[in-house]
Image: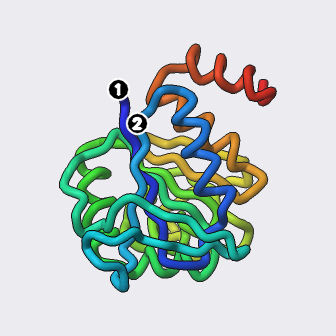
Amino acid sequence: MPTALVIFPGTGFEEIEALTPIDVLARCGVKMTTASPYEDAEDNAEVHVEGAHNVEMVVENLTKHMKTTFDAVILPGGMPGAEMLGRDPLVEELVMAHHKAGKLVCGICAAPGMALAKWGVLDGKTATCYPGFEKHFPKTVHHVNEPAVMDGNVITARGPGAAFQFAHKIAQQLVGEKKANEVGKGMLFQ
């Protein structure tokens, strides 16, 4: 069974960009895990995070406890959440370990510019992001205005309206195009 990790900042993430991949991938049979670097949480307590539009969620783990390698690591966008993820050394370490292992590294909206580009994940790749955040891309990144883009083991997407395309592209890689398309058709995406 394929596995995926969605990393939530403590606050300020785009809810649709975090929840859509969780929902779509779970429907495809991917084992989903959620974590946050939010340090105010007790090690054995529930970790509560709040989205950019005041939707509160509970995530399962703290990133400092993530020792497993997943088939995909997903960073939602939103501000200041993407910036918070981008400056967290544990999140960087976790994402870079997956990137170096050739696992999928996925970011949407502000996350490609505020985190993935900062860490060198996008160097030499074609990528997209929320309009304006491409200013954080180094010159080696080929920026395109597509809803969702895959280059090598990296998937990026533009923003909230592209959340389903983003999730679908991740699903295609984790469970195959046939299964991803079946689930998409059942959700009236196709």
Left or right side of 166 for 188: right
Which element carries disc 2, helix, strand or loop? Answer: strand
Residue 11: where, in percent of width, then height? 55, 79
Residue flagged by tag 1: what amino acid is it?
Answer: Met
Circles 2 and 1 in contact, beta carbons < 8 Å: yes
Residue flagged by tag 2: what amino acid is it?
Answer: Lys
Answer with the quarter of the image where residue 177 lies: top right
**Identity of the residue drawn at 56% across and 61% down:** 76
Q: CA distance from mark 2 to mark 1?
A: 7 Å
Marker count (numbered): 2
User: 173 or 52: which is nearer to us?
Assistant: 52
Residue 158: where, in percent of width, then height? 69, 57
Against 101, residue 46 (above or below) is below
Write down the residue under mark 2.
31
On the question of residue 43 being in view, the answer is yes
Against 11, residue 98 (above or below) is above
- Number of other residues with Cα within 10 Å of mark 1, as a class: few under 14, some 14 to 19, many 20 or more: few
Against 83, residue 35 (above or below) is above
Write down the residue under mark 1.
1
For the N terminus, the image quarter is: top left
